[in-house]
Amino acid sequence: MNWEGEMMMSMRLSFNTAIARNILKRFWPLWAAYFCFLIVSFPIYLFGVTQRMLAGKSISAPAAYLGRIVLGNAVDQIQFNVFTAVLVAMLLFGYLCNSRGNTLMNMLPVRRDSLFLTVYLTGLFPTVGCQLLAMLAAVPVCAGQGVPGHYYLLWLSCTLMSFIAFYGFAVFCTMLTGNILIIPAVYFALNLAAAVFEACLRSCLTYLVYGMTNSDARFLWLSPIAYVFANKIHVEGDWSRGISSITGIGMLAVYCAFGLLFAFFALLLYRKRKMEAVSDFVAIPVLRPIFRVCMGLGSAVVLAAFLFSSFFGDIIVGGAAAVLMGILLLVGACLGWVAAEMMIRRSLRVFPLPWKGLAAVCAICLLTVLAAETDLTGYERRVPDPDQVQRVSFIYDTQLEEPENIRALTELHRKIVDEKRLYDGTQNGHSAAFPEAVTDEPASSRRVRGDDTITQFWVPIRYDLKNGRTIQRSYMIAAPTGDVDRPETTIGRLRELLNTREGVLSRMEADVHVEEENIRYAAIHIEETNGINQTYRLTPKQAEELWRTAMLPDGEDQKICIYTICDTEDNLRTQTNMAVYIEAQREDPNGEIRYWGHEFRIFTFSQRCLNWIEENTDISWVSLSELYAMREGGEGNLQ
């Protein structure tokens, strides 16, 4: 019975007030500085915004505007807590990296569980207190302005949850090493590991897997710091009704829960941590093999991605690229493994190495290259069923939702996949099918020298499926320029899909209503024979009239906002030397500024636009074909 009572007592945690007071006496300037920062960055800043708003009286909905400021400040505090958390953890648990401090703390007549809990809570409670006081100080600043009270609670929730999340993980990181200078490196490295590893791995795979894109970050959420600074947690809302909210607060709550979980893991490590681990790079012996493997794999993909993209990406393609990528991965794995061993032993004498683990890491690298090169997963051949697709986005922000257009695009996608042999070498600037004639000039800005010139064209595709998932692919295709005007060719079919009625109208869709009161700048740009554009300014009233009576109807008839892909002689004859640029912006009720701007090339068949320009301006225009002929003949400017 006695031993059972002793076990129950040993499992009981208690908070030691004497140790807590000592910590507060030593580190009170830390919380004083943090409190001053909170006061300046929230209540005082909010006071300044309120006073400027009242003095100017230019905000139509002050409550909505101030509410957005409060929530925006909450997002800023989340980002600041990334650094505050690791600083607090380093200072309070820094005694673990100091022989004298570690010995003195462990000589105290306090169980390790109680000691950990005391230090952990002493870092947490004062910080939370500072946040609570800052929120209470901000409430009267906006008194009488109608700011909803739950916005302040939302601010406190975000600030509190973000600190708990990052503080718990930072405390966990302090248990992994015995060197105080390594703690922030471990903290940021582990926080960013998933995002960096995925980005580098995707960079490597883009040279091996046909259609692979490195813009689709699926595992960003596993890197909290990257997730936060990628603006995944941000303010949005129904601006017309003055309602604001914070998107991503659910993920922040998940991070907070994991922060508490990592604090518990830190407690488990703290119980078993040896006093002799002071100054060790890896303080927990059982984690050293894991550290070697992580260093080996991480160094392999980072080194391979950097070297291949920097020096070989535009030179080596196909099977040779796979061989070189495998070699770079092996070199990176070996270097990372040796570096990890140096850190663990704290010496340059690392031989003999634990070769079995290194061999396993090298095998993983080679198998990854083999699987990518042979398309073992079927990634390259995977094209979604058009009946499962809700929307397709591709070149020039073109969006298609009509079933027949989606089906046509998926058929084109399958054709591009079937023609891999022609385009695979074109992925990084070269064409396997047309090695002699290919040029690096952008297709959209090139004047063609003949039908045998090879046009390269980047084709990014994004499918939004009805089940909420997305599929992204990216291709660089090459074809003779003459194929652009042949609908039966791949590039010709692509041009037709780009210029469907739905595609044209999707590109003309404005985020801001193009009305006189919203238009900030409008002009007709005229290309002259000397290569310099002349500008004919339009008034907002003229711009609205041109947009409403000519450009929108011409867009409905597919006679404007047309993409020619490249400038063949036929295309040059249909394009005029004029382009209309319109820029509009609108202020939402809460003070948010929305902006839209676009330039539209005028074609010889854009009849309504040409009629409006002829009736309302004195501009003389010619086709681009005529303009280039005049330029070569040395003729003067048109205007």
Image (cartoon, rainbow, N blue to C red):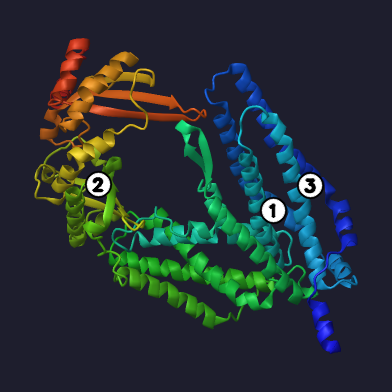
Task: Name the spot of residue 164 as percent of width and height, x first.
Answer: 67, 56
For the question of whether residue 451 can be seen, the reply is yes
Judge depth for marks 3 and 2 and give the one in front.
2
Residue at 69 percent across and 55 percent down: it is 86
Left or right: where does residue 634 sit relative to residue 29? left
Instruction: Check residue 31 in the rendering and tell me which mark sits there, or answer none.
Output: 3
Cα separation, mark 3 vs mark 2, equals 54 Å
Q: Which residue is mark 1?
A: 85
- Looking at the rendered image, the quarter that the N terminus falls into is bottom right
Question: Crowding at label 1, few (<14), some or many (≥20) Cα neighbours within 10 Å?
Answer: many
Q: Secondary structure at mark 2?
A: loop
Looking at marks 1 and 3 on the same chain, the residue that comes earlier in the sequence is marked by 3
| Amino acid, disc 2 | Glu
Left or right: where does residue 436 sit relative to residue 128? left
- Looking at the rendered image, the quarter that the C terminus falls into is top left
Cα separation, mark 1 vs mark 3, equals 12 Å
Task: Name the spot of residue 465 as percent of width and height, x first.
Answer: 31, 56
Looking at marks 1 and 2 on the same chain, the residue that comes earlier in the sequence is marked by 1
Judge depth for marks 1 and 2 and give the one in front.
2
| Amino acid, disc 3 | Trp
Task: Name the spot of residue 81 as percent of width and height, x first.
Answer: 66, 49
When the figure is inspected, residue 18 is found, relative to residue 616, above or below; the finding is below
Question: Crowding at label 3, few (<14), some or many (≥20) Cα neighbours within 10 Å?
Answer: some
Left or right: where does residue 254 sit relative to residue 179? left
Decide: marks 3, 2 in contact (CB < 8 A)?
no
Task: Name the spot of residue 115 as percent of width and height, x first.
Answer: 82, 67
Cα separation, mark 1 vs mark 2, equals 46 Å
Left or right: where does residue 391 sit relative to residue 42? left
| Amino acid, disc 1 | Ala
> Of 290 and 349, which appears nearest the observer?
290
Q: Which residue is mark 2?
A: 401
Location of residue 123 (image quadrant): bottom right
